[in-house]
Image: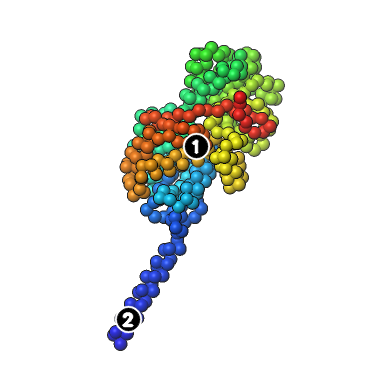
């Protein structure tokens, strides 16, 4: 009887063990993925986190970044290689204090690599934290110089504000787009003021004639009559708008109501103006801007990205989406080249990624032959775009 009971006990334990193993095996597929969002399990998984405005006035930027990063993660995980990702985004509503709270939540989650914050002021706050904590940081779209200053492990995929300002002035000069130029900018926004300062410096160097310089601030960003009247009275035939798309859409609407029709020139923050609910997009016809990405490009990589993004999320991807997509693939390239393993601590990963980024060349949607210097700034060429028939097309 004792032998029989012992045998039965052994059989029960063996069955239980097999059942347990079988249950674990059904949790994952061969690549360790548990679902289509990029959640994975196993030793090859790297946890990437980011914060952005997923709600609020700047949500179009945050959701574009999140969606495109998510798309890149899905594609990479589907390859089934040694590098797998798990991605998590937290909402910061374009607020610096909330961004730090969101960043701390990502730390608690186990983040290993940080995609920074989407907009500049929040990213200034979170990059200071990630520098101290030694997380490698690559922001897709926070273009303030303060994001990088004094931080050896913080990098940008987007143009820095100075590059946008000087490049815009150079483009306006080269193409002879305006004889008298007005500027309207947001005085309490580091993105807007950063672009403005280098635009003015380059404009002086090129002898561009700035006849009007008008500011606005949060709380006074719905009525632009005074700024537009000053530009109109001084004969400005081109208005430079270093700002995000929401105030720009109001400026275009109010200028039309006044019968004022200068040429308009903006920067990458205006990418998305065609998607604003209730905005008459015909008013944006002819608006020019510099951006590293054109969704109407005929190259195969861009066409495939746009088609997949649109079918997945129902929108045409903007430049912020393209930069985020490039961020994930650049990190992927660097991790592969550096033979990184997911059991490396954040400091070791940071050192490895810094070494790779400062020595590698990367081809992406937003540029070919991209490189980064030791400050974390990217080198790539902007493209002139104009809105024509409700779409962005390349400027000659």
Percent coordinates x, y for residue 378 in the rendering: 44, 30
Percent coordinates x, y for residue 21 in the rendering: 39, 66
Image point 58% across, 34% down: which residue? 294
Q: Which residue is mark 1?
A: 364
In the rendered structure, the answer to whether residue 390 lies left or right of residue 377 reads: right
Name the foreground residue: 55 vs 284.
284
Q: Where is the C terminus found, in terms of image quarters?
A: top right
Percent coordinates x, y for residue 324 in the rendering: 49, 39
Q: Tell me if residue 277 can be seen.
A: yes
Image point 61% across, 26% down: which residue? 395
Percent coordinates x, y for residue 124 in the rendering: 42, 33
Local crowd size for mark 2, using a 10 Å CA cut-off: few (<14), some (14–19), many (≥20): few
Q: Label 1, secondary structure: give it.
A: strand
Label 1 or label 2, whichever lies nearer to me, is 1
Tell me, for residue 30, which label it has, or none. Answer: none
Local crowd size for mark 1, using a 10 Å CA cut-off: few (<14), some (14–19), many (≥20): some
Image point 50% across, 28% down: which residue? 381
Query: How far is disc 1 from disc 2 in space, using C-alphas?
Result: 63 Å
In the rendered structure, the answer to whether residue 266 lies left or right of residue 369 reads: right
**Up-down relation of residue 383 to residue 210 (above or below):** below
Sequence order check, earlier mark of 1 and 2:
2
Name the colouring of the figure.
rainbow
In the rendered structure, the answer to whether residue 298 lies left or right of residue 114 reads: right
Q: Label 2, secondary structure: give it.
A: helix
Name the foreground residue: 139 vs 227.
139
Q: Which residue is mark 2?
A: 7
Which residue sits furthest bottom?
Answer: 1
Q: Tell me if residue 59 can be seen.
A: no
Q: Where is the N terminus found, in terms of image quarters?
A: bottom left
Image point 50% across, 17% down: which residue? 202
């Amino acid at each position: 009887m004792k032998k029989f009971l012992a045998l039965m006990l052994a059989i029960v334990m063996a069955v239980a063990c097999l059942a347990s193993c079988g249950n674990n095996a059904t949790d994952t597929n061969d690549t360790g993925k548990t679902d289509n969002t990029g959640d994975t399990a196993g030793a090859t998984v790297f946890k990437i986190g980011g914060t952005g405005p997923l709600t609020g006035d700047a949500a179009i930027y945050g959701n574009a970044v999140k969606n495109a990063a998510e798309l890149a993660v899905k594609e990479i995980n589907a390859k089934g290689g040694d590098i797998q990702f798990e991605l998590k985004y937290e909402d910061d509503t374009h607020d610096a204090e909330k961004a730090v709270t969101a960043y701390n939540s990502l730390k608690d989650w186990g983040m290993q690599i940080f995609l920074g914050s989407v907009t500049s002021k929040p990213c200034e706050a979170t990059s200071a934290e990630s520098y101290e904590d030694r997380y490698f940081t690559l922001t897709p779209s926070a273009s303030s110089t303060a994001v990088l200053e004094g931080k050896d492990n913080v990098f940008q995929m987007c143009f820095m504000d100075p590059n946008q300002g000087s490049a815009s002035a150079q483009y306006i000069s080269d193409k002879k787009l305006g004889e008298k130029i007005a500027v309207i900018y947001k005085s309490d926004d580091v993105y807007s003021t950063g672009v403005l300062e280098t635009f003015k410096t380059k404009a002086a160097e090129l002898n561009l004639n700035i006849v009007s310089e008008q500011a606005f601030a949060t709380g006074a960003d719905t009525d632009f009559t005074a700024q537009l009247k000053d530009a109109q009275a001084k004969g400005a035939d081109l208005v430079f708008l270093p700002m995000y798309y929401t105030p720009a859409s109001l400026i275009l609407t109010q200028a039309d109501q006044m019968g004022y029709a200068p040429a308009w020139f903006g920067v990458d923050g205006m990418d998305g103006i065609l998607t604003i609910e209730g905005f008459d997009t015909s008013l944006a016809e002819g608006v020019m801007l510099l951006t590293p990405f054109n969704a109407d490009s005929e190259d195969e990589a861009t066409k495939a990205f746009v088609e997949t993004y649109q079918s997945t999320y129902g929108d045409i991807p903007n430049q912020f989406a393209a930069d985020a997509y490039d961020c994930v693939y650049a990190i992927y390239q660097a991790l592969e080249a550096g033979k990184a393993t997911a059991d490396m601590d954040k400091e070791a990963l940071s050192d490895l990624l810094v070494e790779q980024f400062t020595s590698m060349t990367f081809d992406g949607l937003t540029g070919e032959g991209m490189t980064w210097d030791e400050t974390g700034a990217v080198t790539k060429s902007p493209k002139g775009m104009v809105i024509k028939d409700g779409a962005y097309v390349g400027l000659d």
